[in-house]
Image (cartoon, rainbow, N blue to C red):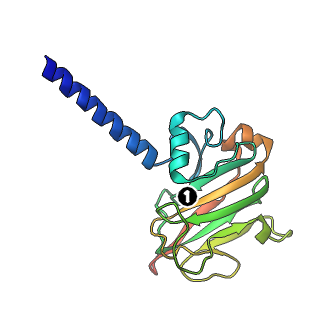
Amino acid sequence: MIIRSLIAGVGGLVLGAAGAVFLVFGPADFGGVSVGPWRTNIHIGSPDAPGLVRAVVARRGLLALNRSETIYFSADADSEGRALEAGCDYRVLFTDRPDARWWSLTLYAEDDFLPVGGPGAYSVSADDISDGEAGFVVSVSQRPAIGHWLSPENAGNFNLTLRLYNPAVAIVEDPSRAVLPVVERLACGGAS
């Protein structure tokens, strides 16, 4: 009887520890809202965030502001659900400017940091878009592109993070109402 209890206790500790490690070091999209390929967790930056969300934020090094100040959307797949890969070319199509006072779109390598080496073209922001551009395209490719361009060189399976600073009240209240860009895969390794 004591051995069974001991085995059950140790088993519970192992399962609990494994679950905690997975949740803290694994995907950060639990409890989130999805809009196409984009996801956000409404608890990130909230003073009421559960301890697990705070642990994930601390582990990933995300300086999370309050949701009324910034909403973070991330995509690790295109609009058809395929993983974003450094060897593929993509078009990120904004049909309109994000509904926020200021915004940025940043490419992160599979380790959640900026890619090491390469040309350093990892972010596009509201400052890069001219006043006349309502809808616009951001190209993601190994080769430099005309216009707005992000380089996935040395990024492996990367992700895109769209930060909306001082987002519209409607988006703060319901992030699923945000009009977010389509992420379209154009070609991989010379083929579409």
At 56% from the left and 83% from the top, the residue drawn is: 143
Kind of residue at badge 1: Ser
Q: In x, y percent, where is residue 178?
A: 70, 48
Up/down of 154 relative to 61, above or below: below
Is 107 placed left or right of 94 in the picture? left
Up/down of 82 relative to 44, above or below: below
Up/down of 88 relative to 143, above or below: above
Residue most extreme to the right:
131
At 64% from the left and 48% from the top, the residue drawn is: 64
Please tell me how crowded label 1 is: few (under 14), some (14-19), or many (20+) other residues with Cα within 10 Å: some
Q: Quadrant of residue 118?
A: bottom right
In-front residue for pair 103/181: 103
Q: In x, y percent, where is residue 52?
A: 50, 37
Q: In x, y percent, where is residue 129?
A: 78, 70
Q: How many marks?
A: 1
Q: Is residue 166 visible?
A: yes
Q: In x, y percent, where is residue 46?
A: 66, 38
Where, quadrant-wise, is the N terminus in this rendering? top left
Q: Residue at label 1?
A: 79
Q: Is residue 26 visible?
A: no
Is 50 placed left or right of 130 in the picture? left
